[in-house]
Amino acid sequence: MLGYVTLGTNQFEKAAEFYDAVFAECGAQRLMELDGFILWGTSMEAGAVALTKPFNQEPATVGNGVMAAIQAESKDVVVALHKKALELGGQDEGEPGQRGDGFYASYFRDLDGNKLAAFFLG
């Protein structure tokens, strides 16, 4: 049901490099680029993550309780996404592991403090 999630940034170029590397771990790539906006995904028909400078020109801030979740193809991809995010300066919010029956996940924050999850169902 979810089409895409948009995350704000105050350091657009650095954040774009962060997400290029993180999303490469799960086979996603840039699908759309406009001035101050990038959309990553595996196809235009699947869910995606967008990065932007806020339209109102105000500083981007982190929404408390807001999180984007990236569905991975395997537990190994969940681990790889988490590891890559931390290597690039992201913050750990929860090591990869089983979170319930059939739900394996990890949690991290990007360079601006946005919270993301990587998960595998199975």
Image (cartoon, rainbow, N blue to C red):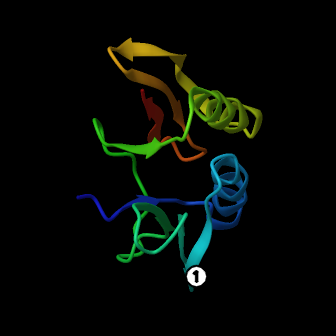
Relative to 115, is 18 above or below? below
Q: Is residue 122 left or right of residue 13?
A: left
Q: Position of residue 64 (x, y in %)?
A: 29, 37
Q: Is residue 113 left or right of residue 86?
A: left
> Relative to the observer, which residue lies in front, 84 or 97?
97
Q: Position of residue 66 (x, y in %)?
A: 30, 42
**Disc 1 target residue:** 33
- Split into 4 quadrants, where in the image is the N terminus? bottom left
Residue at the image point whose x is 35% and y is 76% from the top = 56
Q: Can you name the residue that lies furthest to the right here? A: 87
What type is the residue that disc 1 sits on?
Answer: Glu
Residue at the image point whose x is 63% and y is 37% from the top = 81
> Relative to the observer, which residue lies in front, 75 or 93?
75
- Split into 4 quadrants, where in the image is the C terminus? top left
The answer to whether residue 27 is visible is: yes
How many callouts does the rendering have? Answer: 1
Residue at the image point whose x is 63% and y is 48% from the top = 26
Residue at the image point whose x is 36% and y is 21% from the top = 102
